[in-house]
Structures are given as structure tokens and as C-alpha cells.
Image: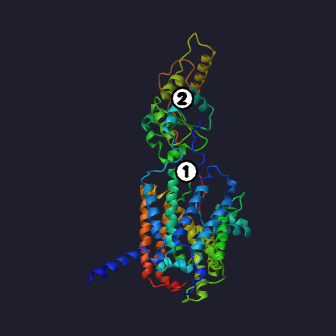
Amino acid sequence: MLQPSFNKKLKKLIIEKLTMENNKGFWILAPVVLVLAIVLAFMGNPLTHKDVPPQQLLLLAAIGSHYYSTDQVAEMLINHDPALVLVDVRQPAEYEKWHIEEAVNIPVDSLLTPTWYNWLTRPGQTVVFCSNDDALAQMAWLATRRLGASNTFVMKGGLNEWFNTIVNPPAPGPMADKVQLALYTKRMGARQHFYNLGMVGEATEKPKEAPKKVVKPTAVQHSAAEGGC
Amino acid sequence: MSTQDRSKQYMNPYLAGVLLGLVLLLTFYITGRGLGASGAVKSSVVAAVDAVSHSHATGSKYYSQFISDDNHPLNSWLVFEVLGVFAGAFLSGALAGRLKLKVEHSPKISSRTRLIFAGLGGLFFGLGSQFARGCTSGAALSGMAVLSLGGFLAMIFIFGTGYVVAYFFRKLWI
Amino acid sequence: MDLNLILNTMGPLITNGIIDPGWNNYIALLLGMAFGFVLESAGFSSSRKLAGVFYGYDFVVLKVFFTAAVVSVIGIYLMGHLGWLDISKLYIQPAYVQSTIVGGVIMGIGFLMGGFCPGTSFTGVAIGKIDAMVFSVGMFIGVLIFGELYPLFENLYNAGNLGYITITEYFGIQPGIFILGLTVVALVAFYVTAIIQQKVKKVDY
């Protein structure tokens, strides 16, 4: 009868394959490592420690400590503050039409590419986003902060506010106090600095075009650790 | 029943692999970089050339990359690591009774042949590791651990080439 | 206001300042010792054992290498997920495509000629293998040759730089999927080579 010897042979084959002399430990290693890999595959993309919880961001936003006023930005620009990076997040067409001098144009859709993001978050920089009002800039701020950047801010009021404070500072009325007067003087000074517009009168025309600021982000410095063989 | 030669008893390869993987993991966890080997040879060469002729070393486009005023080329992470490798291997060999001065070669070839090819092999490896900026430990193994493209590339071409040329060197081994 | 409140104990420990960088070289020494110990224990100090992977009589290289790669990559990415390790801070070597390929080919030939690679040759030296010592001297000379002839190689050496890029970035595969795939390939390879080893003529070494 063939059947019993066939079963015996099959059993022998299975046991042989399971306990291959030169493969000891395989059957312990394989399931463990496979399970771990499957678990890992289901975990999606690893977070870097910088993935900040939204609540904390909203708290910051509520306090408003992420704002720079147009006056502050103007002052930093006049003083050539080396830490300041003014980033205009509008589309290139709008930027070409008019932008604040020294502002770099990085449209929101390019902001988070590794090249630009890494350039933005280099240590020692204070990045201030601006857009027409500050809606787009706020989004840029939120997105970058969410990824863990700690050096991004928003110019409050955006370019519209810039117009209303620096290009055309509102003249203080007769009831103005010292502080308001000082602010007005400062703003007029800034206006003079940026646009060479006289002390008198409202600027009805758009101030002269500022040259496009071109920045070449250097090659992505991917890692902080040194290495190599 | 013959007693098995103790010195031929090696650790289970899978166990060794797990341990090595853990060491590598620990290395990345603590230092942010992986293990390596050929870099230490490079450092030694740079240091030697520098010692023989500083002007030649600094004048060379290659060596000068690795010379800096405030740090001796031998004062590098890899050099220390490799010193550790010697020590660790010595310890393991000592415990297993494998410490023995000898030329290991297939009985089908002579000692001399083995040594000639060992020297040539080393030469090729020294040369190749500079092109690839690493070797099997540094580029391939550590590279794979971080999913580096360069690492996988190195691994594929080292072992791929190995299989292709194995036939031509078979007399050395089997 | 700085939001980095959480996870001050995130790795890499030295990069993140949790361990003083001054210790780095001593840590290198210790890690190297562990590295060397494990390699030698597995038999990597024997050139004939190493060469076995190319002829089918000993697959220790495949088993140790692949297992180590799989264990460490899973470990790294798991730790990344758990927030214990900042993967973006790990060193990833820059990919110089042409140069790496040329180097790999040369090293592949060197492997079959010498029966060692740099790391394993050191373990061989440590236990007294003269062929390993000769190999090491050969390496020294090889690096020297490269250095002296560098102007010839310079263009190739610096060609095709894709930057510090990972496989997942280049091919657009999710790391988890790739790692799972790698693990499966490794396990299949282990099984298949075990069968091959059984069929291949035994070598006494």
C-alpha cells in the first residue's frame, strides 16, 4: 500500500524543512521580524518630534504673540536687521506688481517643499510672512509651525496695513498725544526711507517698484549629525 | 564521537544579525550616525601623508579636504570606532580560542597566492571605497538602516559585482 | 515663545545635546567594540567563511547583514514613530550615483580577490590572520593611490550628486511599505539560501 509511506515521507519532508540544519533560529526570527514590519507598515509616516499639537498653536494665535506689526517690520528693515527674512507668500504675479523691498517671494504652494522649508528654518532667522491682508500669511504661519518651525511669524494686517501705516500713515488729529505724534513721525521717516516720498501729501500712486529679491536656497542640509565612512 | 573544534563554533548568524542590528540602532540613537570602517583607513592615509609632507597633503585636492588646522585627522569618530573593533574582535577571538597567527587559505592554493590576492583585494577595496564614499559597513549597512539611496546603491553593486566575478576567482575559494 | 516643551529626551542623544558631544569618541570606541565582538563571533574574521556567500557553501554574510539591516531599520522607524528618535537628524550619505556604482564594482572585485571587506579585515587582524593584515595594507595603498591620482578621478567622484536622499524620497514609496517589502525579501532569501546551502558541496574550512 502506497498511502502510509507517502504520509510518512510528507511528514519527514515538513520536519526537514522546518528544522534545516543550517537554518537554526530562522523560525524564531521570521515571525518576530515580520510582525514588527507589518505593525510598522500600518503606522504610516513617522512624526518628527516637531509635529506640534494644534491646541498649542491656536493658543499662540489667540494670544497674538506670533504677530509683528508693520512698524516693527519697517524698523527691522531700516536697521538692516540680519535676522529678518520677510517672506511674501502671494503668487509671483502679485509679487511682481508690487512688493515690499527686501521681501522674498515664496508662494504658499512652494513654502513646504524641502528646499524652501529647510532654508526658512535655518537657525538664527526670524521669518515674517506677509500677504495682502494677513489671511494667507496666517496659513503659512500655521503650516510651518505645525511642522515644528519655531521662527515664523505674521506681519499683522499684511500689505494692506503696510500701505495704511508706512506708505500713507494717517496724520494725527489735533487731539494727538506725544506717543501718537512720535509714531507718525517715525512712520513718515520710514516712508521717506523706503519710497522717497515727501513729507507732505498722500501717496496716490503706488510707490516705485522695488527690485525683485532673489534668494538661492543652498543645498538641503538634510541632517544635523556628521557621518560618512 | 568527535569533539568539535571549539574555535570553529560561531554564534548563530541570525542571533549575530539581531545583535548587530541592535548595536547599529544604538549607534544611530546615540550619535546620529552609523558604523563604518573604510573612513578610518582614509584618515590613516591622510595622517600619514600629512606627516611625511604637510605641503603635499594640503596641496592635494583630495587629502586637503580632510585636513583641518584644529583637528588631527586621526582624531575622528571612525578611528576610535575602529580601534574598538580591533579590541572587541580580539576579545571575541580570545574567548573562542581563535587567536592564532596564520594565513587562512583554501588547500587548493598556496599561502603565497592567498597573500597576493589578499593584498590586491585590499587595494581594490581601498580604491573602491573612496569612489563610493564608504564600504559594506559604512555605506551599505548603515546606509540601508536609514533607507539611504546611496547605501542601497553601494550594496547592490558590491554584491552584484561579486556574484558576477565569483566564477573567475573560484579557484581561490573552492 | 518656544513650543518645544515635549520630548526633551529625543534621540539622537548627542545631536540633541542630551549627551555631551565630548563623549562621542569614547562612545565610538565602545560601540566599535560591540561591533567587532559580534562580527568576530559570527565568524567574519574568516575570509573563507565570508566568501561562502558567493559560492553557496556558507551564507553567514547574507544572514547577518540582512538581519542587521532589517532589525535596525525597523528599530529606527519604530523609534521615530514613538517619538524617541528624530529621524530627520540621522546622517544619510549623499548619493553620488556614478561614483558609487564605480566604487561598488571595484569593491565587489576586491571582495572576491581578498575575501574581506574593511570591517571584517580588522576583525581578522585582531585575531592574527596574516591574510587580513596584508589586506589592510593593501587598503592603505589603495586609498593612497586614489589620493595621488585624484585629479584623474575628480570629475567622476563628484558627478551625479542627488543629495542626502532616501530610497523613499527618490521612489516615492512609503517607508513602512518599503521596510515590509525588504523584510519579506530578506526572509525569503534566508529560506531559499538555506536550501541552496544544503545542496551545495560542503567545504571544509
Chain containing the residue with disc 2: A
Q: The residue under label 2 is which amino acid type?
A: Gly
Q: How is the image coloured?
A: rainbow
Regarding residue C81, the answer to whether it shows in the image is yes
Q: Secondary structure at mark 1?
A: loop
Estimate the x, y position of residue C13 in percent, counting from the top left.
62, 52
Give the Cα distance between marks 1 and 2.
Answer: 30 Å
Does C88 sit above or below residue B37? Answer: above
How many residues crowd mark 1 within 10 Å: few (<14), some (14–19), many (20+)? Answer: many
Direction left: furthest residue: A1
Estimate the x, y position of residue B95 in percent, counting from the top left.
65, 75
Q: Quadrant of the C terminus of chain A?
A: bottom right
Q: Secondary structure at mark 2?
A: loop
Does C165 sit above or below residue A154? Answer: below
Front residue of C11/A115: it is: C11
Chain containing the residue with disc 1: C
Front residue of A162/B77: it is: B77
How many residues crowd mark 2 within 10 Å: few (<14), some (14–19), many (20+)? Answer: few
Residue ID at (44%, 75%): A19
Front residue of B171/C126: it is: C126
Front residue of C50/A141: it is: C50
| Residue bearing the label numbered 1 | C86
Mark 1 near mark 2, Cβ–Cβ under 8 Å?
no
Residue ID at (44%, 80%): C198
